[in-house]
Amino acid sequence: AASRLRLSGLCFLLQVLNILLFAVFARYSPESSPGRCPPQLDCSRRNQDSGFQQPRFRDVHTQVLLSFGLLLAFLGRYGPGSAAVSILIVAFAIQWALLLQGFFNFFLNGKIYVGAQSMVSADFCTAAVLISTGAVLGRVNPVQMLLLALLEVTVCTLSEYILLSLMGVSDGGRSLTVHTFGAYFGLVVSRVLYQPHKDERKREEQQDMGHQTDVFAVLGTIYLWIFWPGFISATAAHENAENWAVLNTYFSLVASTVATFVLSSVLYEESTPRMVQIQDAALAGTAVMGMAGEMLVTPFGALIAGFLAGLISPLGSRFFTPVLRSRLKIQDTCGVHNTHGLPGILGALLGTLLTLLATADTFGDRLELVFPLVTQGSRAVTDQALIQLSALPLTLLLAALGGGVTG
Amino acid sequence: AASRLRLSGLCFLLQVLNILLFAVFARYSPESSPGRCPPQLDCSRRNQDSGFQQPRFRDVHTQVLLSFGLLLAFLGRYGPGSAAVSILIVAFAIQWALLLQGFFNFFLNGKIYVGAQSMVSADFCTAAVLISTGAVLGRVNPVQMLLLALLEVTVCTLSEYILLSLMGVSDGGRSLTVHTFGAYFGLVVSRVLYQPHKDERKREEQQDMGHQTDVFAVLGTIYLWIFWPGFISATAAHENAENWAVLNTYFSLVASTVATFVLSSVLYEESTPRMVQIQDAALAGTAVMGMAGEMLVTPFGALIAGFLAGLISPLGSRFFTPVLRSRLKIQDTCGVHNTHGLPGILGALLGTLLTLLATADTFGDRLELVFPLVTQGSRAVTDQALIQLSALPLTLLLAALGGGVTG
Amino acid sequence: AASRLRLSGLCFLLQVLNILLFAVFARYSPESSPGRCPPQLDCSRRNQDSGFQQPRFRDVHTQVLLSFGLLLAFLGRYGPGSAAVSILIVAFAIQWALLLQGFFNFFLNGKIYVGAQSMVSADFCTAAVLISTGAVLGRVNPVQMLLLALLEVTVCTLSEYILLSLMGVSDGGRSLTVHTFGAYFGLVVSRVLYQPHKDERKREEQQDMGHQTDVFAVLGTIYLWIFWPGFISATAAHENAENWAVLNTYFSLVASTVATFVLSSVLYEESTPRMVQIQDAALAGTAVMGMAGEMLVTPFGALIAGFLAGLISPLGSRFFTPVLRSRLKIQDTCGVHNTHGLPGILGALLGTLLTLLATADTFGDRLELVFPLVTQGSRAVTDQALIQLSALPLTLLLAALGGGVTG
């Protein structure tokens, strides 16, 4: 009874705190009502950008899709019992991320200006939190989950601010700041919380679900195919770059799905892979396209990247997860290391490679959109590639530190 | 056998009647083919409006989402057995609402001009019918359902015409004409049809479903989060007003979800609420934003309103539903009073309050969009608030009368 | 073990082949990056068209919906066990269709230019393949499925090229080239593969699923209602024509649903039809609107067509399927003949009739959009109608030949 009331009280306190903070700081962005633009905001500049920003406003109603896609994906592994807590996490993390990101990025004149753009950013942070919870699902109680969300959103916002704003890393689909960060944060927390006795029982419960798992896995896979490509493009710089990011993501999905069929019959004694494996392949295929999605200029590049990601994911779950469990004492309930961690790292390496190859010749007008700093002459292509590369260990470091402290 | 044939015959007759009525009266709106505009329609004026109307045309393929969202929501409570009849109701009610609303609003030159706009209106009426059926589900047969739809669409169209066209009430997301009207119409019908013996058996059937309920509730909740904010904005006056309505609805959803977690562990002996409760909270959070969605100018207002709606809904189902059942002899199969009725009333009161506070200062250019009559000087802010307030008892009266007659 | 490895090896070989072919031939369409237009492409002409093409680009993320809608629909009949193989088929067929259609339609300067437009075309072919697999589901192994997809995509691309490009048939929603072609291709394959002993066992497995079938059927029906109208319009010529195609499809869906209720209680001893039947009606209602969707100028026409399609489908499954099975030795696992074949033929006949009636008077400006050749004076209305009519037996012939060879 006490723990129930603790959850109830914590929810109440946090929500009241959020409302107070929003009341003091948050206002709707005046972009949408042109007549009320305060002079400090320099609206004329923003209106010039509106050709770029308007299309994204149309997608505002899809912004929470990202998190829910992940949610559906985990339901395939863990069943509807976990859904209630996950939705609580989403509801809380979105508010908290809006506030924190507002303090870093949108803080002007003592107010945070909230708009479609800031909600999309907040949702990316929420997605990272959901990936992390996937690693510890079933072993922490709801109160611990809430605290994890509270801390992870803070670290995630900090990491996004350092990588994207200060260092100018180009990471449109967030291979690094969402997939890799979320996966390793969750794994480190999982390591700290290691308790050898508990997981046997949980595993059995998981097996029980049987048929229902398949239903959710089918739905999750279809959901990922339908909505995810739209997401990758939600933060892409421009209409044109968006188109390519969408197509690249489709090609990657297609190739990673075929790759699953190639490996599953070799690794396991099954004629066709189970739906959950196909779903993991879809997740891996999208994770790998996060950074490289807007950089790839040929369809076969996306096919190769997706094929590799689709091969890495089942290989990882076959050979790497047992090592993680026995040697490093890390339990990975939903296999986030294979579906988000490894493909995210692969995507980041691919993005670095593509940055090195980026020339005005192959990119054309798109160079300006994807790497604005390079076009302005303030940074060489090799410098940009170095920065992209250095973002990877930095992300891993931040994730490990944050996860350790949280655990 | 006779009752089966009666349903079959009724469907056939009604469909033939609909086809005949459409053949005589309905034509596609000539807006979309500029060359064929009859002189009476004054197309030039309409084309001037097209800057406002075009964005809504894009959303035409989401118009039936509203009803189906409700459908999915009820599946969570009542299982797929009810889906077939519900889809029949939707299919019939859309046609009937198009015809009736056409006679009231789009009747020009002896023809009803059907377009995307009129289909969205028809769908709102269909949603009200579905809410009402939620109150009587499991206790009426399909033929009765069809007659209920026939009558309710008529009353609903009348109520919309009086409130929105004649009185000029601003009710963008239809807190009043859909949520409140639908809920109380259904409750009054349920009261008239009260039969003490039948419901025990039904209740047991409902309990049987167990696991599958959760699947539908998870899907329904995700569906509401994804698509509903887009709906609220479907009828909003303008691109800018749309954006705020969408964001307000998200904030309301977020807060009402947290509120469910606050109360569920206090009211019930559960550590986490069941998915059906979270789904109810999502419905309540959207219902409360119906009228106020385009009026709220700060995010924390939406958070507070959603939080209150999320608190009212479980409190209502804990303390109010037993009173309804035992004292007033009203059975509320799907709990529409708590998820649509009470939040709808709360939303209407909130809308009235916000109308009182509406000044050119806080609204800026948006005042003209939300309250066109006020800006034109033909009506004071206080008058508008009075009219908004008086719309509430009027809706309740119409719903009660209509429900009584139907029952 | 050998057959498992054969599937694995075949997937690997085909994917490597696809990657190589894409590497040699496919490049992203330079439309999206205006600065890099090769002179042969005459970009200026294309940019003039961009007013027409841009809206479709927005829908690019919904392109795979078509196939997945069908997938969900078949899940309702056959359960999640078939989902894994179906997704493999989709993943492979999209790549193959892109390559083949590229050789026919987009082959310029030694390269295939891949863009949103070509992906939509490829997806239509994939949908035809999925319809065909629906006829043989449960009786062929995954390797045979892959070979079927390989051959059918080839024939389908050939048929699309002959009908749409050479003959100038107007078939916006692909009644002929997707629904009719896919259905009869699958039926002929099914005839060739006829094995009398196997199907009894399968039928029993199918019965086992029971409850889960309903879940998928509900989801599939909702999916069809929500997303299909958007598809029909994806290939429609123009914004205005799109609107009517969308509305026509809704009316057709509504009427075919009511028609199911009319017949089901007469044909079967059930008070309400099962969800699978309602889903079939929705499929039939959309199939019939494929060709005629952009030609119909009155709502009641769409209501009548949908009503007829909704009547044909259950009548076919009651009286025609047993004849097919016993006399012609064709097994039709998912009933594709009734839901795609017959309504597709009905739609083609309706399209022919409407073409005959098409005059500048009734169509207005739309004539130019739907029948560009007629407006240019190079073809009389009756000639166009003859061509539309002759396309039907040609499609059937190609489907039968292709199916025979494949089988």
Image (tube, coloured by chain):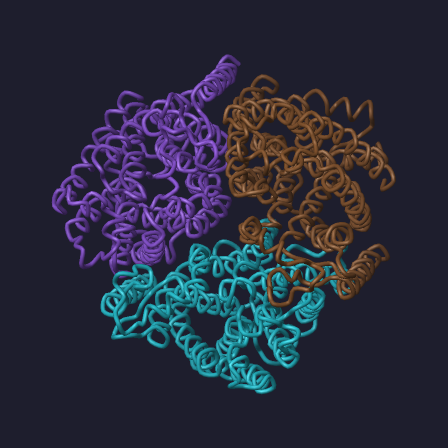
Chain colours: A purple, B brown, C cyan
Q: Nearer the viewer, residue C19 or C250?
A: C250
Q: Position of residue C182 (x, y in %)?
A: 51, 72
Q: Is residue C197 visible?
A: no
Q: Position of residue B276 (x, y in %)?
A: 59, 33
Q: Is residue B196 visible?
A: yes
Q: Quadrant of residue A390?
A: top left
Q: Is residue C43 above or below residue A374?
A: below
Q: Position of residue C296 (x, y in %)?
A: 64, 70
Q: Position of residue A120 (x, y in %)?
A: 40, 38
Q: Quadrant of residue B220?
A: top right
Q: Is residue C189 above or below residue B361?
A: below
A20 left or right of C9 in image: right
A113 left or right of C324 in image: left
Quadrant of the snapshot with the N terminus of chain B? bottom right
- Residue at the farthest front position: B377
Q: Nearer the viewer, residue C260 or B336?
A: B336
Q: Quadrant of residue C199?
A: bottom right
Q: Nearer the viewer, residue B350 or C292?
A: B350
B346 left or right of A119 in image: right
Measuring 12% from the left and 42% from the top, which residue is drawn there? A383
Quadrant of the snapshot with the C terminus of chain B? top right
Q: Is residue B291 above or below residue B235?
A: above
Q: Nearer the viewer, residue A201 or B259?
A: B259
Measuring 39% from the left and 60% from the top, which residue is drawn there? C88
- Residue at the farthest top position: A2
